[in-house]
Image (cartoon, rainbow, N blue to C red):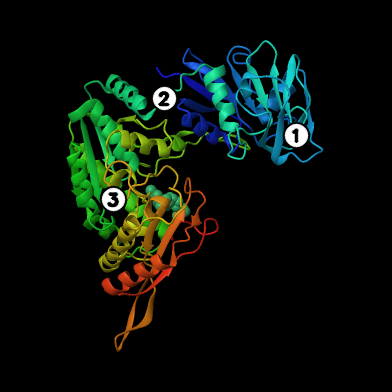
Amino acid sequence: MTEKIVILDFGSQLTQLIGRRLREINVYCEIYPYNKIPALDENVKGVILSGSPFSVRDPKAPNPDLSAIKGKFPLLCICYGAQYIAHTCGGSVNPSLAREYGRAMLSIKSESPLFADIPQKSQVWMSHGDTIAQLPTNATVIASTDDVENAAYQIDGEQTYCVQFHPEVFHSTYGHLMLSNFALKICGCSGDWTADSFIDSCVADLKAKIGNDNVILGLSGGVDSTVAAVLLHKAIGSQLTCIFVDNGLLRKDEFSSVLASYKDMGLNVIGVEAGKRFMDALKGVSDPEQKRKAIGRTFIEVFDTEAKKIKNASWLGQGTIYPDVIESVSVNGPSSTIKSHHNVGGLPEEMNLKIVEPLRTLFKDEVRRVGRALGIKNSLISRHPFPGPGLGIRVLGEVSEEKLAILREADAIYINALRNTPAPEGWQPASGAAATGGTETGEGYLTLYDTIWQAGVILPNVKSVGVMGDERTFEYTVALRAVVSTDGMTADWVHLPYDFLAKVSNEIINKVKGVNRVCYDISSKPPATIEWE
Ligand code: XMP
């Protein structure tokens, strides 16, 4: 089993970031709500307490019993965590008088393994309304800032370290080194959790769990379901049957090219051409939510019919990833709802299958790294997210074959141009992306596509007047969208170069019959959303 660090979440927005930072130094970690502390077996090398929107002085603040942890495991307490230890172990926490938000200069006051190889003065990021007025019993201050005397302390005779700042944020210049000191030097983790080691242990676990049973998995063409399928295939080979449904709302040539790639990878995949059924279900429907429901319902019916043809299947494989799983703690207490995975939400209970989710401990960029380590092609791994209802929610209003055909052509021109255009100097890959230009596997040059989180064309239900040659035209407008984001919750529009936009606009108007106008969407989320419906 893998060694790990357990992070107890007190509801801070930054808790996932602590997890990310540890994974970046190849240390495996798991996040749990503070009131669902897991059994701490010999694989647990240390524990981290997160920040929180609460004040420890609030009667409703989280107050877990840490007697099985403090003094028994190496413990790093961040922000609320540090205040909670002070509050419950003989110290005191008061509202802070000085400003304790933003950048501050940390001065190390006394030697500590937490600060190994860190300069005596360095920048940290503070974000709290309370401050530790008096340290807990047996504690020593190890660092201060101008405004905060007890910025960091440790408990004598224990491996308990407390910091009021946030080492996990980028603005804490040596924060990553503090987390690395804690995980590697203090907890003694080996830091050998890599994509390859994940694949080895995951494949062994899947073999043990599934044995000789059969598994069904729905492929969407997206990164998560593809990587989940390849991992399962590596573990159980022909016991896995994949189902890839063509809902008639995919991009140009997507069904045939993705299906061919799946077959090339040796996957046992059934391609189901169900476009007509989806179009029938969408007939006369123009409300965005009703469209989503019609598409979702039809998907379940089609998938269920195909799945029933597979004999002796007892497992359903899913591409659920870690952010879908983590139970976040809301200000009003821990939430009991786990986000349902878009692509499988609502599969009928009576299918009576056990669920297997090989990626449920991975973040999105880790799924991509694992995919690359499995040798999956860049054209699959580097794909932008694509919504389950597909082009059905990018044709605004009622969907028709004519509008879908126009959208597909325009979208293909735009996406190909993004994939084939080198990014300007200084542009960075989107979160978790690699440089894929000019190559199908491994690294190439950085393309515009690689720098974007999600891009696509929208067909608003709008026709406008134009002129082509001597002729008046009355044709569709299309809108190009490109955003950067980390999780789709917020997004900024991308400042694509004007000459690139000019080239794409020209090509679309010249080549796509039925379009005489191209717009670029310059709205961020919020207040807009990424998709238009
Ligand atoms: P919005 O439009 O809400 O989209 O800003 C955020 C992200 O979610 C995707 N999205 C969906 N994915 N089913 C899906 O599987 C849906 O109904 C759906 N709606 C939006 C969207 O593409 C973006 O990545």
Work out whether 14 lies above or below 462. above
Above-or-below relation of 422 to 508:
above
Does ligand 1 reach within 8 Å of label 1's beta carbon? no
Q: Amino acid at mark 1?
A: Asp
Dot 2 falls on a residue whose secondary structure is: loop
Q: Which mark is residue 4?
A: none
Q: Is residue 34 in sight in this rendering?
A: no
Which residue has dot 3 on it? 438
Q: Residue at x 37, y 36 (%)?
A: 369
Q: Is residue 34 left or right of residue 103?
A: left
Can you identify the residue that label 2 sits on? Answer: 193
**Which of the marked residues, 2 or 1, is nearer the chain's N terminus?**
1
Residue 445 lies left or right of residue 70; in this view the side is: left
Mark sitting earlier along the chain (3/2): 2
The label nearer to you, 3 versus 1, is: 3
Image point (23%, 31%), residue name = 233
Residue 130's disc number: 1
For the C terminus, give its image quadrant.
Answer: bottom left
Q: Residues within 10 Å of mark 3 (few under 14, many from 20)?
A: some
The residue under label 2 is which amino acid type?
Answer: Trp
> Who's the residue at 48% across and 57% down the image?
529
